[in-house]
Amino acid sequence: MTKIAFVLVAAGVLAVASPARADRCDDLAAQLAQQIDGLKVGRTVAGVIYLTHPAVKRASLGCSARNKTNEIFASSASRKPPKEFFDFVASATALVFTIPRADALRGAQRCANRIGFLRGKNIVTRYRKLDIRCTGSAEGTNVIVSRELDV
């Protein structure tokens, strides 16, 4: 009898815990929209919430996965992104990962400034326990900020 009760309790806990992950991500996206001027939250597809902002071409918030916490993706329309692009990335990163905005700004700019002839077009760096990936192309620059889970 106790095994059946344990299985029912475990199934109940799993059923309650599953929607909470999506709710936390939706709450985080709503918090981003409240804190960043001009940010609008779009639809959610496969754990990714699409965002729109005047300073970026494309942006999204990736929800937690097995090996990562949340992920911020931003794409600019130019090879050398303007200051407003980095302001958006820094603000979103600071809110999602609860680090100082100045550190988030420095990490994103540092990564994007390394794109070039000597280091290549795909830069992967770590700054303040954040994984920052920058990719440069003729169409623009992409910045992805994430944090791996400590296993």
Image (cartoon, rainbow, N blue to C red):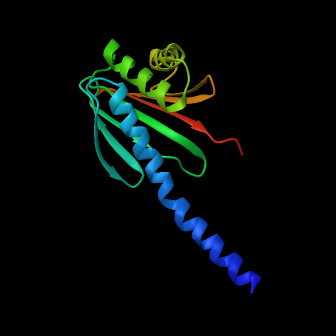
Quadrant occupied by the N terminus? bottom right
Q: Position of residue 149 (x, y in %)?
A: 64, 42
Please tell me which residue is depicted at 34% across the width and 20% down the height of the picture.
85
Viewer-proximal residue among 120 and 32: 32
User: Residue most toward the right?
Assistant: 2
Task: Tell me how many marks there are.
Answer: 0
Q: Is residue 61 above or below residue 101?
A: below
Q: Is residue 3 above or below residue 57?
A: below
Q: Is residue 107 left or right of residue 55?
A: right
Please tell me which residue is depicted at 63% across the width and 27% down the height of the picture.
129
User: Residue most toward the bottom?
Assistant: 1
Q: Position of residue 66 (x, y in %)?
A: 59, 52
Q: Position of residue 37 (x, y in %)?
A: 29, 23
Q: Is residue 119 above or below residue 147?
A: above
- Location of residue 8 (image quadrant): bottom right
Q: Position of residue 71 (x, y in %)?
A: 48, 38
Viewer-proximal residue among 26 and 130: 26
- Location of residue 75 (image quadrant): top left
Please tell me which residue is depicted at 50% across the width and 52% down the height of the picture.
21
Please tell me which residue is depicted at 47% across the width and 20% down the height of the picture.
108
Q: Is residue 96 left or right of residue 53?
A: right
Viewer-proximal residue among 36 and 108: 36
